[in-house]
Amino acid sequence: MADTAADGDQRIHVGETADGERLAFPIVEMLTGRGFVTGKSGSGKSNTTSVVVEELLEAGYPVLIVDTDGEYYGLKEEYELLHAGADEECDIQVGVEHAEKLAHLALEENVPIILDVSGYLDDDEADELLRETVRHLFAKEKKLKKPFLLVVEECHEYIPEGGGVGETGNLLIKVGKRGRKHGLGVVGISQRPADVKKDFITQANWLVWHRLTWENDTKVVGRIVGSEYADDVVDLGDGEAFIQTDWSDEMVRRVQFKRKRTFDAGATPGLDDFERPDLKSVSGSLMEDLGDITDRKQQEQNRVEELESKLENREERIAELESQLETARDVSAAARKMANALAHGDAAPPEGYQATLQTKNEHIDRLEERVDELEAKVEDGAAETTKADNEDATEDAAAPDPEPDPEPATGGDDPRDALVDAVQDRLRRRGERSKLRDDADADAAPDASTAPDAETVVDLLQAPPVVTRVNAARRDSKCNDDAAWRIASELATNPGASAHDLAAAAGIDVEPVHTLLRELRTRDLVTRDDRTYAFNADRMRTLVEHDDPSKPRTELRDQWEP
């Protein structure tokens, strides 16, 4: 229980002086001041801190202990504390999302808390949890102004002397400098005073120096306490210490702290049997409140994963539509170029030419309308994705089902019908010329029984897998786009033509024709027989028959094009 001094201050009994007098610390100074407790391992510094905490809890004052080694849970043997951390042995596993609730419980519901950061595998996670908890403590104390003590073990990890002080360390220093007027005190514990920022030590209003043996540490004692104490501090017994306090007239006193009453969870394991005592549990309703925060965090995470999955599906849909759009553009461009090449094969158009050309252009226009539809679907998919990104993570938005995969333009709108009509017109225009050439040089011309008819070749040239490969051959050759398709149309309607024939028909030099024919032969689309060329209809037909409409066109291009 707390003592009442002659001046009316409440005090806690923590030990005896060297003269045998009762050693008592004023409660208000302990709760609102800045303290520093140091000593090598086994000297009694953790025992001293535990004694101070036990006496404060006994007097009804809650504290928050930042436990870096998992050695304070023994306090639960006598006191109802919330043990929060990452280990399963804790009352509850907490993360940064619990920081504000922990500060609320400590200050507004008077719940003593052990914030055990020893079990976190990720140091940044533990650091963020501590920083946010202290931030909420400091913010709440500005309004509450309630005496409260924050105990920080291994404080040199947060406010080091040599290294840079991080965001958490700066916040602890801020609490030390400004927390007193708000009622928030802090005490730092460390084995190595030489490693702790000296500004923190020199501004403390109560200090406890247990046994220290390292020269760098004794030098700190000499600078702050005095050289005579630097020599004596190495000989202090367990639990003995030199203390400096602002509330005492004596500058330095040698004292003996009493032993803690509760289970010593930080004691070095020995050969004796170890038996963990029964520990007090915390309120069930309090645990439910903290559990609700954990559940909400999991629900939010599940919602985020669900939205990410929807976003991924939409992105895949957009990529698929873009692939189909590109293929449709290729087919449309190829159809228009080949139609133009066929339509301008002779100087004078035959009878019915304008009607055939108009029909052909109408079909091509329909195909380009299909391209526009695909472009609209791509834009809709992108807009839908942007909308999903901007939705609140906790609000369910029913996304429309994606449109079914568009089928290639077929049936009555197929531009290949117009191209076949154009080929037939052209063949009729050739008329006697083709017959006379075949009669004059029957041996050189392809065998009529085996050579494919021009309509079939032109039809195959419009198939997407063939268009893709012809375009790839054109890009790898020295032939431009218009000339390439003029050559293709000439070769489709005039199998057995030579490179010079094709160059003359296209109105270009023979060298780019040779490069185009070489690339087409590399892809097995063109055959060569005694310096004459013809399309390989069997190979083209195989490509069309084995084309998988469901396979994205980008994969076909990646497979056949460089």
Image (tube, rainbow, N blue to C red):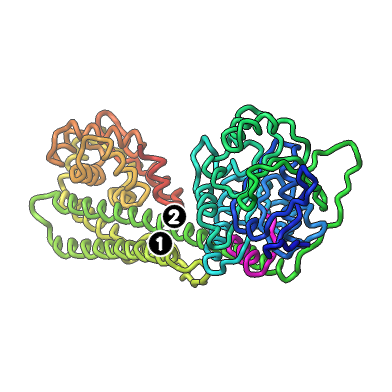
| 240, above or below 332, in the image | above
Image spot of residue 143 (x, y percent): 53, 69
Identify the image quadrant of residue 479.
top left
Q: Which residues are magenta?
A: 98-115
At mark 2, the secondary structure is loop
Query: For mark 2, what is the residue?
Result: 549
Please identify the quadrant where the N terminus is shown.
bottom right
Query: For mark 1, what is the residue?
Result: 407
Which residue type does callout 2 highlight? Pro
Indicate yes or no whether the magenta region holds residue 45. no
Residue farthest toward the right in the current orientation of the protein: 273
| 449, above or below 14, in the image | above
Image spot of residue 119 (x, y percent): 68, 47
| 183, above or below 545, in the image | below
Q: Residues within 10 Å of mark 2 (few under 14, many from 20)?
A: some
| Gap in angstroms between the C-alphas marked 1 and 2 | 8 Å
| 393, above or below 214, in the image | below
Secondary structure that dominates the magenta span: helix
At mark 1, the secondary structure is loop
Disc 1 + disc 2, Cβ < 8 Å: yes
Q: Is residue 304 left or right of residue 411?
A: right
Indicate yes or no whether the magenta region holds residue 111. yes
User: Toward the viewer: 554 or 516?
Assistant: 554
Which residue type does callout 1 highlight? Glu
Q: Is residue 278 visible?
A: yes
